[in-house]
Image (cartoon, helix red, strand yellow):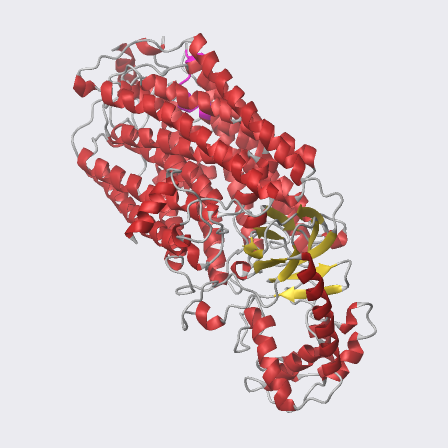
Amino acid sequence: MSTLDTTLHADAHEHHGPAKGMGRWLFTTNHKDIGSMYLWFSLLMFFVGGCMALMIRAELFQPGLQLIEPGFFNQMTTMHGLIMVFGAVMPAFVGLANWMVPMMIGAPDMALPRMNNWSFWILPFAFAMLISTLFMEGGAPNFGWTFYAPLSTTYAPPSVTYFIFAIHMMGISSIMGAINIIATILNMRAPGMTMMKLPLFCWTWLITAFLLIAVMPVLAGVVTMMLMDIHFGTSFFDAGGGGDPVLFQHVFWFFGHPEVYIMILPAFGIISQIIPTFARKRLFGYASMVYATASIAVLSFLVWAHHMFTVGIPLAGELFFMYATMLIAVPTGVKVFNWVATMFRGSMTFETPMLFALAFVVLFTIGGFSGLMLAIAPVDFQYHDTYFVVAHFHYVLVPGAIFSIMAGVYYWLPKWTGHMLDERMGKLHFWLSFIGVNITFFPMHFIGLAGMPRRIPDYALQFADFNMVASIGAFLFGLSQLIFLWNVIACVRGGRKAEARAWEGAEGLEWEIPSPAPYHTFATPPQLPESLR
Amino acid sequence: MGWKIIKTIGSGLGLTVYTATASAAWEVNLTPGVTDVSRSVFDLHMTIFWICVAIALVVFGVMFWSIFHHRKSRGAKAHHFHENTMVEVIWTIIPIIILVAMAVPATATLVQMYDTSEAELDVQITGYQWKWRYDYLDHELNFFSNLSTPRDQISNEADKQEHYLLEVDRHLVLPVETKIRFLLTSNDVIHSWWVPALAVKKDAIPGFINEAWTVINEPGIYRGQCAELCGKDHGFMPVVIEAVSKDDFNQWLADARVAEQAEAAAAERVWTLDELMQQGEQVYLRACAACHLPNGAGVPGAFPALKGSAVALGDVAAHIDIVLNGKSGTAMQAFRDQLSATELAAVITYERNAWGNSLGEAVSPAQIARLLTPSTGEAEQ
């Protein structure tokens, strides 16, 4: 294989490995090192945010206040949401992009390596600042991850200022990461790799990166307006000074809804890489996948007020946002149909990455159905701010985004470490997670419909049984993630040797280079393999 | 228990008819409610649910059929097709048609919900941290409605009663078969007033007024909760509606006014320190303890302590001022409209003489009543 030879030769010629000691990690500009750091950081945050979730579920195990005070409960829901969204899901996707985008397009590294280093190293400081608020007088932010004013301004604990600066830093990190991904994909593709030959993971990330650049400044704007209201006497969100608390929600959700797609589009990309591999069949409808992703991204800017159906927007606005939101079901449906059509008449095997990908398709679709129900404005009056919403977004985020990340990690681990995963342990992790996630979140549909509001530390007796079930499921799911940690460490340390093409049906440039991938790959542009020509 | 589970599964499959009271603990579905609007909402909910189930059966059906039949272990060979414009156009168009079919009834219901015209009774609802105030605008009657679940039930020192956390000291009494318009606003942060049986949920936003309406068909007691995170005790501000016949409603209005006059008269008599302390403790636990804690210790960094505090041990006029008028820019509310003169005098007396604060002086209800009178309208409250 000529591609392989050129790469290896070039590598041997000017080979220099990673630096030694801490310096390697502090000063690295290598996309693989930075990708690994993003992924480890995200895993750490996943466990931190997970512990907070377990504290919430432990308190909700039974009615009454047993373990934590309502004020602290609110800090837990807020911090859980912020850490999972900004600390676990987003950095994990950036980590996967760092590792895989250059290898998939045949580039030697990211386009802007030193900025890449900086965008990672901002994150630990941002989260140290955010988490430090837990130990401050008055406690951590307690106004929900959506931080609606005036609860988050006039009525906020003093630590809100630290929260605002932490958000600013996360935003800077995300914007730099996004610029890097766009620059890499647009400029550094191997000769002959046209845009319509780009692997779907790169396509979805490219579109995600544009969403990030568009909306992170909006988030920065809204927290800055809060800062001004709190410290500099403005009244953006205070009706008493001529402002409007609902303005906050419009600006926040103008960021927040595209943010939802920022957390799911890369997942679509990962799943679109994995299903064809294990179905041993090309992805069905590549072009329609690209167009569907792009239309979801465009629509995501036109639907923000569906989070605000109860704030009293006029009838015409309500109808517009209802119709626009329902429309998103069309491209999303196209994606699901394409995945199913890829499996249809394939030759399927069910290794761990495929199991996670299949669970993603089913459970994400269930989350999509509840999303469609939530889009219907008159019925949303009953669902809004109940556990039905909690069930909905956890279905799209946990067995959605997080399962896709786990699928991606299991899929590419052999390429990163050079070792195959212990399939038995992988399957154990999958089945416990799959069962746990459903026991946790499925009953939340029921308690939500039965009338339990979200973000409450104690509840009426008719919600007791399903809450207990959900809490049991949460502990099962949470503890199963220790197997994930064990699997990753075991795979790094040893295991059956992985071939360059670790999975039989895998196609793409990343599978043309040896496993583990050398520290530097594609120092000279590769020739495209047969499948991409 | 076993029966309950069977019933849960049964109703999950849509096989059993909904019953409002039985098996409440394993309830899996929305309430159809007691208004025409809530019933159309419920029907809409069920229609969309069944459409989703049907789509799921088809999509997952094909998927699991492929997973079963097109697996390598069964010797399946992969085919090579990877696009088909006709199929792709069809599965874009069909969902659009289904969505239009959903949008039509949804639009009709929404238009109906937005028609607040020709209301026969106006009730203003104001959210406070963490209670509701109801103001019958045409009848010069207003009151606060606080959670009445005793603290020892919340802290698990007593058995929880049937309506745990869904019970209040004063119900919002409303007449049936009357178009009632709700005008919602808030005194502090955003709250959301929600009664599932009416399918009414609307945010109460400080500085703005939202509208909603209902016509209740059946007398009864309907319970709901605040639905928008509004701070520490967001989970402890329920809504309880008592729907009664029109005659009973008028009678209730008359009785409520008599009770108000009696309350005002009580402020004029002389109260002893012990009496004030006794009532003060009750008022304190209801109105103040959520933030300042039952032992007056407060929460450092969030809510100041009253025990040994400069305000509670200092100048009485300043103490009265902060309780009556609140402190702007903080969570400290103005209680002048929330409590009667007697209650205000009692609670201030209590704060100055409890938990080791021992000034030994009483603040008289009459003194507070004089301070309340100059303010307009609501002084007699």
Tally of marks? 0
Q: Position of residue A178 (x, y in %)?
A: 50, 31
Which region is colored magenta? A193-204
Residue at 49% across / 43% down in the picture? A389
- The answer to whether one can see residue A168 in this image is yes
Q: Position of residue A454 (x, y in %)?
A: 49, 51
Along the line of sight, the residue nearer the viewer: A306 or A102: A306
Magenta stretch, main secondary structure class = helix
Quadrant in the rendering for residue B107: top right
- The answer to whether one can see residue A260 in this image is no
Along the line of sight, the residue nearer the viewer: B302 or A34: B302
Quadrant in the rendering for residue A420: top left
| Horizontal relation, residue B86 to residue A224: left or right | left
Q: Residue furthest left?
A: A496
Q: Residue furthest front?
A: B247
Along the line of sight, the residue nearer the viewer: B80 or B155: B155
Q: Quadrant of the N terminus of chain A?
A: top left
| Horizontal relation, residue B282 to residue A519: left or right | right
Residue B166 on the magenta span: no
- A245 to B369, vertically: above or below: above
Q: Position of residue A280 (x, y in %)?
A: 27, 17
Residue at 62% across / 35% down in the picture? B109
| Horizontal relation, residue B124 to residue B2: left or right | right
Q: Position of residue B119 (x, y in %)?
A: 74, 48
Residue at 36% across / 29% down in the picture? A361
